Amino acid sequence: MSPLSKVETVTIETILERCEKYITSEEELNTIKRAYEFAKLKHEGQFRKSGEPYIQHPLCVAQILTTIYADYETISAGLMHDVLEDCDCTAEEMEQNFHSSITKLVQGVTKLSKINFSTENEYLIDYYKKIIVGMSEDVRVIIIKLADRLHNMRTLWALPEERQKVKAHEALEILAPIAHHLGIHKIKSELEDLSLRYLKPDVFYDIAEKLNKTKLERDKTVYDMQHEVDDLLNEHNIKHEIKGRAKSIYSIYNKLDKGKKFSDIYDLLALRILVDTEQECYLALGLIHSKYRPLPKRFKDYIAMPKPNMYQSLHTTVFGTDGYLFEIQIRTYEMDEIAENGIASHWAYKESGGSKVRANLMNSTEQKLQFFKSIIDLSHDGLTNEEFVNSVKNEVLNNNIYVFTPKGDVIELPKGATALDFAYKIHTKVGETTVGAIVNNNIVPLSYELKDNDIVKINTNKSSTPKKEWLNMVKLTQTKSKIKSFFSKNDREIYLERGKYLLEKELRKKKIAYADFFTEENIAKICENLKVENLEEVYHIIGNGKSSASSVIHIVNKDEDAKTPKIVKTPTNIDADIIVSGIDKVKVNLANCCNPIYGDEIVGYITKGNGITVHRLNCHNLEMLEERTLEVKWNTNTNKRYFTCFLINTTTTENHMLDLMQTISMQNINIDGIKTINRNDYNSYEVTCYLAGVEQYQKLVLSLTKYPYVENIERVIR
């Protein structure tokens, strides 16, 4: 039946027939029937504004609940959801006739019905969403409320136009997002379409008309494509079912609203493929991609990485029949159940024990709801709407406060949070560089305890850093963790710098050339002996005093007398990495700022007492060193590997570290380290490694830039 039809006639026989498809207990079915008879008796003589007997409304709510396989308690409560509010009936009377869990569900829906929602601004929308979820100690209360509102939206034509728009706005801004949060696609999609029908009827009917005009052509194209894919999967013995998938009017409106033309909305043509197993999902995807060219950047794997509401499916867009673009979803039957019915699908299968996916779904959703479940049981009778909302705000949400930025953005914090907590909540960098706070135009200490509706401004200084006493000023565990993390990271950097300095100082003291000591073989030997992974960790344990620089050097030179420092002869122009023009023997170091590698254009700089340091010709540090530079060149006989550092800049915030590491390793390059640098809208990866020279680096760049998400690669000069 069309969601826009004016009158629905539903009988209890219809409800029971639907329930029998998934509820096997005779006792549970009898409870549903008794709930109907109880509700019919209590609503006797009541009529809806649409004209039909009032009992039709709870029957329609129950019917909606059966479409998402709600359990018998939910359906029973759905049938009686208005009895406590609109009829001469008490909770005690209901509990005498039905199980207490059913009565609690009805009480929960009754409390929600007392709220007058407001959608005046984003803050109030978020506020009421939290109230709805927070008051629902049992998630089924929300599901009944969603079904209740959906039927009311189906009969919204019976209300005056002004009330229609108010109700439609509430449904779109508050209830549809909650349905999405719970993964109940059926209800979410219909709420959105019906809301658009009353908020923007011209737009709604314009889209509907365009869909109807192109329906015959689209149906034929979809049929042809479906037939081809069906043959392809049958040919490879993959048992399956294929459905044409309709695009909701509201989702089309959203795309048009963002500037797209109707003709450009390519996923109007869509197929959904259902298979038995997860493995068959990927097999089907591979077969489809082998026959139909996929549209770049349109593949999504929600099976390996489900959405927060546990939605799982493979999404791809391909050039299908006659060159038309098709959006294809591939999922198992079980995934399809969860995608359509969300958490509600859990109860339909609880008797058979359910599956791991459903268990994860239930646990995930329940965990999300825990944050909001601090709502206390408001059992006061006779409260007005205003008193009820104030009671919720003052008695229930008193564990949280809402404060404002100078621009009017709302920030939610726990009660007792300080100005410093607020700073870190805005952004970690803001917190770390905080030097003062102004609340309601008054300067306050960073330990100032914020109150509801405070307007907070944070003053920062780029050169400022956290203080350890801040740990005693903050309320949030997350803030304390960020402060501790800063000091932990800061201490590590100090240890690394100190360790590197001590080791290099000891090498100079023993007259050991850096290039001879920091070979790949020696570094591996030291790391194995000290049981660490890389040179950075060696610096760290020297810097924090767990090992001495002398003992680290002794690991390499342990065959010689430990008391006799190893004297390394300065390299000659025959076997040295670098040949210095006009000088036969001289100590040569490669600069740490630009890390020259074999094949780079280089220049030497004469240091005071430490030989010659070799820089890349484009090193910006040379600007200050021109007066003491000299010509140097690479020895063509060298076969060493050289330390270097480069940045891989990408165009996405997705994590591609594994792909990049595999590509680098396949080039016979030893990776020293790789770390992700999170930018605002993309990631960069800083790679340190040892390679043979410029030629190998250039081959690596060619391999890496084949990835479509790699924007560019640059060598680092510090």
Image (tube, rainbow, N blue to C red):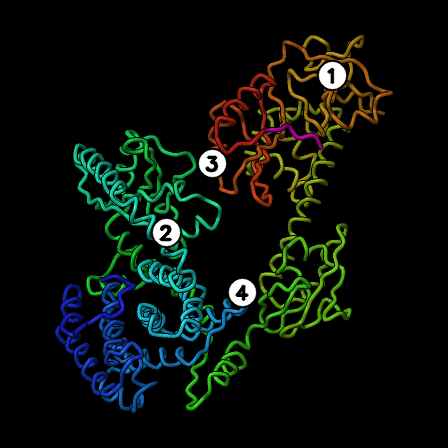
Q: In what element is the residue under mark 2?
A: helix
Residue 122, numbered circle: 4
The residue mark sitting in front, 3 or 2, is 2
The local secondary structure at tag 3 comes to helix
Q: From the image, state whether disc 2 or disc 1 is nearer to you.
A: 2
Callouts 3 and 4 close, C-beta under 8 Å: no
Measure the alpha-carbon separation of dots 3 and 4: 39 Å
**Label 4: element kind:** helix
Looking at the image, can residue 47 be seen?
Answer: yes
4 or 2: mark nearer the eye? 2
Residue tagged by mark 1?
569
Residue 87, numbered circle: none
Q: Which amino acid is tagged 2? A: Ile
Disc 1 versus disc 3: nearer the observer:
3
Whichever of callouts 1 and 4 sits on the residue coming sooner in the sequence is 4
Q: Which quadrant of the rendered structure holds the C terminus?
A: top right
**Residue that mark 2 sits on:** 207
What's under tag 1, amino acid-wise?
Answer: Lys
- Comes first in the chain, label 3 or label 4: 4
Structural distance between the alpha carbons of marks 2 and 1:
83 Å
Q: Amino acid at mark 3?
A: Leu
Report the Cα–Cα distance between label 1 and label 4.
Answer: 73 Å
- Per the rendered image, the range of residues in magenta is 713-718
- Look at the image and say whether residue 262 sits in the magenta stretch: no
Instruction: For the residues labelled 4 and 2, say whether their Cβ atoms are less than 8 Å apart.
Output: no
Along the line of sight, the residue nearer the viewer: 564 or 609: 609
Q: Quadrant of residue 430?
A: bottom right
Residue with the mark numbered 3: 658
Task: Estimate the x, y position of residue 335 in percent, counting from the top left.
Answer: 28, 52
In this rendering, the count of numbered labels is 4
Q: Quadrant of residue 48?
A: bottom left
